[in-house]
Amino acid sequence: MFIANKELASLIAEKAKQAEELLVANNEIHQHDKEKEERIKKIAEINANLYFERQLFEKTLISIGDGVIATDIHKNISFMNKIAESLTGWSLADALGQPIYSVFNIISEYTRNNNEDIISKVITTKSIHYLANHTILITRDRLEKLIEDSAAPIIDLGNNVVGVVIVFRDYTEKWERLKQIQYINFHDDLTGLYNRRFFEAELSRLDVSRNYPMSIIVGDVNGLKLINDSFGHSLGDELLVKTANSLKDGCREDEIIARLGGDEFALILPNCSKTQTEMVVQRIKTSLSKQKINSMELSISFGYATKTDIDQDTKDILKESENSMYSHKLFESSSMRSRTIDIISKTLFEKSAREQVHSERVSILSVKLAELLGISKDEMNSIELIGLMHDIGKIGIEDNILNKPSSLTGEEYFQMKKHPEIGARILSSVLEFSEISSSVLQHHENWDGSGYPQGLKGEEIGIEARIIAIADAYDAMTSHRTYSKQKSKEEALKEIERCSGTQFDPLLTKIFIKMILDNPTI
């Protein structure tokens, strides 16, 4: 019995040991399953992160504003985003597997040849490369787009290149803006010629021995200010544009033509002798002779000089050209302005026939009054001319104001009051008319200082202007005007007498009234 119990106890102990070993084994299996589960979970998390990152990467490539194309190691397309589709004209479906340069067809803007193989360069060097400047992309429908881009290698964990990604953008609009900015920086916006900045830079750049003899021509337009004052700046601008065209007509394409500002132009003629330069000037003058502005000839005074040796200072050559031009301008400009005055008078009278009759009548009345005052013959000749020219400034007044059939508005009257100043500026620019310009300026001044434009009073106003003022008012009142009732001689004289001492010189008023009464035919 004892032995049996001992054997049973031994069996139980063995079974307990086996149970314990089984329990340990079960625990180990459970632990292993737990570790496996954790590994599976971790792998799942890694896959999820990789998927997220891939999605993020793809969505980023799809949504960025640049075109993106990826290739495999064989240079066949494996990916394109929507921007790349739009820029190339190829859809992703059609482009997949295609050789990169079948889709990404690029050439040089200047040579029109295919650009270097940037994909092979990236694969070989394992580094980022950029396209050459002025690269053009030929789209699927043969349109041309200027682009800029970079290409980078795709490298695996073993440091092997497995493909290339190209990022590119349409550079056309940006390049056009840059060209516009560059154009504005170096060109005159009115004539399209080069400006002073470019002229000075080119004069320095071209000043090398291989360009000798190098000539400089300087030109100054005659009468621009006179035309601006007489006909407005729009006509002055037209004069400058036509002048620029004539300069271009007379020159070769490689010669530099610039507007230095205002009415000044300059030309640089590399490899051009003095004799050849004279021929260029003559060609320009011939072209100018065919151009006209409101029946007026275009006139430019030219001067030129030639540099033949490196030791000559270019500044001295430019100065010599300017001095030559100024000497020609002394005669040519005066002659041209004198002809222009005649054209201005003719143009004014064509704009308003009433103005011609009025000016002639004022001139006659003024001379007769001057005779009674015992004024010298030379002064009477001057007064006759002032009478004819006193309203020449009306050339600068708009036609709708000058010929308005009704009373002027406040603003229109303000514009009309500018004509004495305009007339004085026109006449003062010409030597033979400069002496009468002050009288034209003053002919609307009043004896009591209430006139315009300077508010002069009494004898501060020149005698010629005081004479013109009375004759001007009398003829205006006794002539037919659409905006006011024509007065009889008696009514006009009564009005002039009423304004004696305020608008008119009292002494001249008495003499003028007696003159009219004594000469009924005037």
Image (tube, grey):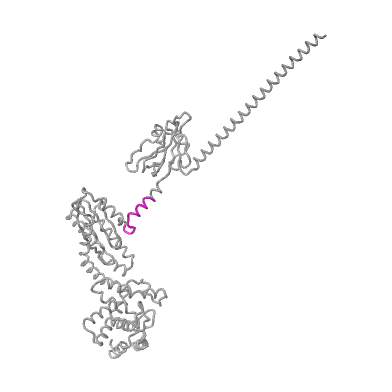
Q: Give the range drawn in magenta.
A: 177-191
**Quarter the N terminus occupies:** top right
Image position of 424 with respect to 66: above or below: below
The residue closer to the viewer here, 219 or 98, is 219
Pick out the residue farthest to the left: 275
**Residue 184 located within the stretch drawn in magenta:** yes
**Residue 124 located within the stretch drawn in magenta:** no
> Would residue 248 appear left or right of 78 to someone viewing this image?
left
> Would residue 468 appear left or right of 88 to someone viewing this image?
left
The residue closer to the viewer here, 4 or 513, is 4
Image position of 269 with respect to 349: above or below: above
Residue 431: percent from the left, percent from the top? 24, 72
Kindly identify the residue that appears in the image at 22 percent across and 69 percent down: 335
Residue 95: percent from the left, percent from the top? 45, 36
Kindly identify the residue that appears in the image at 40 percent across and 48 percent down: 174
**Quarter the C terminus occupies:** bottom left
The residue closer to the viewer here, 452 or 297, is 452
Residue 440: percent from the left, percent from the top? 30, 77
Residue 113: percent from the left, percent from the top? 33, 39
Q: Residue 34: which quarter of the image?
A: top right
Kindly identify the residue that appears in the image at 36 percent across and 84 percent down: 448
